[in-house]
Structure formats: structure tokens, C-alpha cells
Image: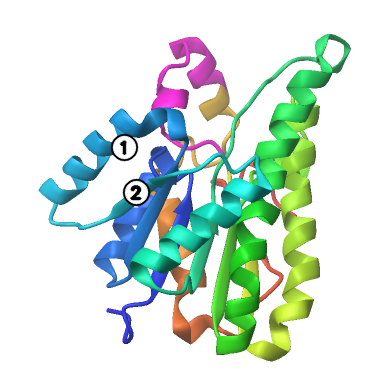
Amino acid sequence: MTQQRRLALVTGGTGGIGTAVCQRLAKEGYRVVAVHHPSEEAQAAEWRAARAAEGLEIDTLGADLASFEDGQRLVAEVERRHGPVEVLVNGAGITRDKTFRKMEHADWEAVIRLNLGSVFNATRPVWEGMLERGFGRVINISSVNGQRGQFGQTNYASAKAGMHGFSMALAQEGAAKGVTVNTVSPGYVETAMTLAMREDVRASIVAGIPMRRMGTPAEIAAVVAFFAADENGYITGANLPVNGGLFMH
């Protein structure tokens, strides 16, 4: 259990990986707020009820994190309800996969604005407070494809690579103040999205992973909890791959 019941804000918190992160942090004693898109209010209510059935009291809030103004509004509301954000997990993201020759500007813009823009939009409003209090954890959920690239994902790979560039730069600004900034780069993970793939496509992906399986959301959540812990305050600017050996660097 965390000594002070620290407050964790998880963007993309009601998704596959986000849910596991919220569950893990709540079980470790954090107070947790999960962020979802404003269009998913009904699903968020069901999600909250499912967590309550597990014995976990997790609040949810809607925000369009492609918008800086909505990021500010979100953090102000979280702080009004629960107090200062001490752990921020940036997990909001979408895909708009297409080969570059077929990619429209809107496909590029949507992915960069949410996947990378949300990192700024959610982190900027909590950053001052973390520095002033002398404690903070910012954990960015990137991707193996931000490390190695992926056919048909120039937009997604650019955003995910940018997330770790952000981590390394901001880590230097927070280091002397007790605020760490780190990146987690998952490989293929069993979520609703990957489970919806055609069986032959899934099989070909798994065949290329040395561990011969996809990861689980709980395995990603374990690494997030590691970075969030008070005792791991000497790790910053790191990128921890969780990919079953798919990419080694």
C-alpha cells in the first residue's frame, strides 16, 4: 500500500491496458481516476460499476485530450474532487493505419494530436504542482513500434517515438526536484483490439515473438506500478520495453 494514498490519473484509463493499470494501482493503495473520451460516458458508467464489483472504487472523467483547454479543465476537476495529481499515466491513443502514399493529412493529424499532443496536454497542468511538492511520477505508454517502426504506421510510430523524446527531455527538468518521467514500450498485448484480429494474422504475429505469445495488460500494469512507486525515485528518462523479445535494443 502507498503510505499517503497518492492520487494517480490514468488517461486512456478505460481501455484494455488502461483498465489493468487502474486495477493494479488501486490494489496497491493509490486513489485512481481513469480518463475516457467524452463520447464514452455510458461505457464509462458500466466500467465504473465493473470495478466496484471487484471492490475497487475508481472515479472516471471524460476529456478530449487532443485539446489543451480540455486537459486543463480535466486536471482542475480532478484536483477539485480529489486533490493534487501525484502520478500521471499517459495512455490515451488511437490508430489510423495506412501506407504513407494513402495516408491523408487528417489521419496524420488525428494520431499526432491525440497520441503525442495528449502527453503535453495532460502533463503540463500537473507539472508545476509536482515540482513544488517535490514529488511526481509521469509514465508514458509508448509502443515497440515507436522503437523499431512499423509498415503502415508512420503517424503512430512518430507519435510513440516522440513520447520517449518527451520523457528524456522532461526527465532532465524534473530530476533535481524529485519528479521522474519514464516510458513503457509494450509489444503486442492481448486486448479487445488484438483479439479481434483474424486468427491467421494473430498467429503470424505470435510466431515472430521469441516468447511465442502476446503480453497481458497485467504485465504492462506491473511495469507502470514499478515506475510509480515511491521507492523507485532514482530511475528517470528510461524506456522499459515489455515485448517478449520482439525488439531488443
Residue 183 seen: no
Amino acid under disc 2: Thr
Q: Residue 176's x, y, as percent?
A: 72, 90
Relative height, residue 60 to residue 134 (above, below): above
Residue drawn at (42%, 34%), measured in percent from left and top? Answer: 190
Is 197 part of what is drawn in magenta? yes
Mark 1 in CB contact with mark 2 (< 8 angstroms): yes
Q: Which residue is mark 1?
A: 44
Q: Which residue is mark 2?
A: 60
Q: CA distance from mark 1 to mark 2?
A: 7 Å
Is 119 part of what is drawn in magenta? no
Residue drawn at (49%, 19%), measured in percent from left and top? Answer: 203
Label 1 residue SS: helix
- Which comes sooner in the sequence, label 1 or label 2? 1
Q: Which span is picked out in magenta?
A: 187-204
Image mark for residue 196? none
Residue 31 seen: yes
**In front of the other: 248 or 156:** 156
Amino acid under disc 1: Ala
Q: Quadrant of the C terminus?
A: bottom right
Q: How is the image coloured?
A: rainbow
**In front of the other: 49 or 200:** 49
Left or right side of 172 for 236: left
Within 10 Å of disc 2 (Cα), the crowding (few <14, some 14-19, many 20+) is many
Q: Residue 1's x, y, as percent?
A: 27, 79
Label 2 residue SS: strand
**In front of the other: 142 or 55:** 55
Q: Residue 95's x, y, as percent?
A: 63, 26
Residue drawn at (72%, 63%), measured in percent from left and top? Answer: 167
